[in-house]
Image (cartoon, grey):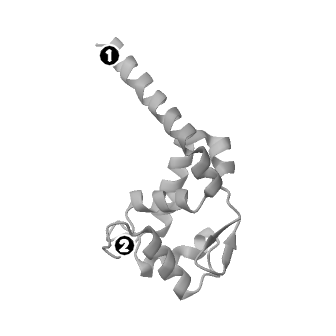
């Protein structure tokens, strides 16, 4: 279990998703989650869009101070909103087990990228 804010506990499913889908699949799912939570007009997650859309991800019990805490925790550039990258970083930070395995996923992604480059160079 990992916590958001002070009082909310949730089951850390990111490692399960990562094991099942691999690094690329996990990133796709995180991007899908971002799309669900973001303000469609601005292309970022705002406090209002998080408040409005959090129930879609089972976060309907979050209190206002917990939503604010999540926004503050993830807002790396201090602009009051979460970009897709900030959201993904936040999700990794909230998943201690996944953070421990993050080097494995980074290596897998780098190997995949190298394989793609090798294939592209071979076809030239």
> Residue 86 placed where, x, y %?
41, 61
User: Is any atom of residue 51 visible in this view?
Assistant: no
Question: Which residue is located at x 64 percent, y 71 percent?
Answer: 3
Please say if the residues under marks 2 and 1 sit with CB atoms less than 8 Å apart: no
Question: How far is disc 2 from disc 1 in space, using C-alphas?
Answer: 39 Å
Image quarter where the C terminus lies is top left
Question: Which residue is located at x 34 percent, y 66 percent?
Answer: 43
Dot label at residue 81: 2
Question: Which residue is located at x 62 percent, y 75 percent?
Answer: 59
User: Is any atom of residue 112 visible in this view?
Assistant: yes
Image quarter where the N terminus lies is bottom right
Q: Is residue 15 above or below residue 66?
A: above
Dot label at residue 121: 1
> Residue 84 placed where, x, y %?
40, 59
Q: Is residue 79 left or right of residue 53?
A: left
Q: Earlier in the sequence, mark 2 or mark 1?
A: 2
């Amino acid at each position: 279990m990992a916590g958001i804010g002070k009082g909310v506990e949730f089951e850390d499913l990111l490692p399960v998703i990562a094991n099942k889908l691999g690094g690329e699949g996990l990133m796709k799912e995180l991007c899908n989650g971002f799309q669900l939570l973001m303000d469609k007009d601005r292309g970022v997650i705002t406090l209002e869009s998080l408040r409005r859309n959090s129930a879609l991800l089972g976060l309907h019990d979050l209190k206002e101070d917990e939503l604010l805490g999540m926004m503050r925790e993830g807002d790396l550039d201090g602009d009051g909103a979460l970009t897709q990258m900030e959201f993904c970083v936040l999700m990794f930070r909230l998943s201690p087990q996944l953070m421990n395995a993050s080097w494995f996923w980074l290596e897998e992604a780098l190997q995949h990228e190298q394989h793609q480059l090798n294939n592209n160079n071979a076809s030239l």
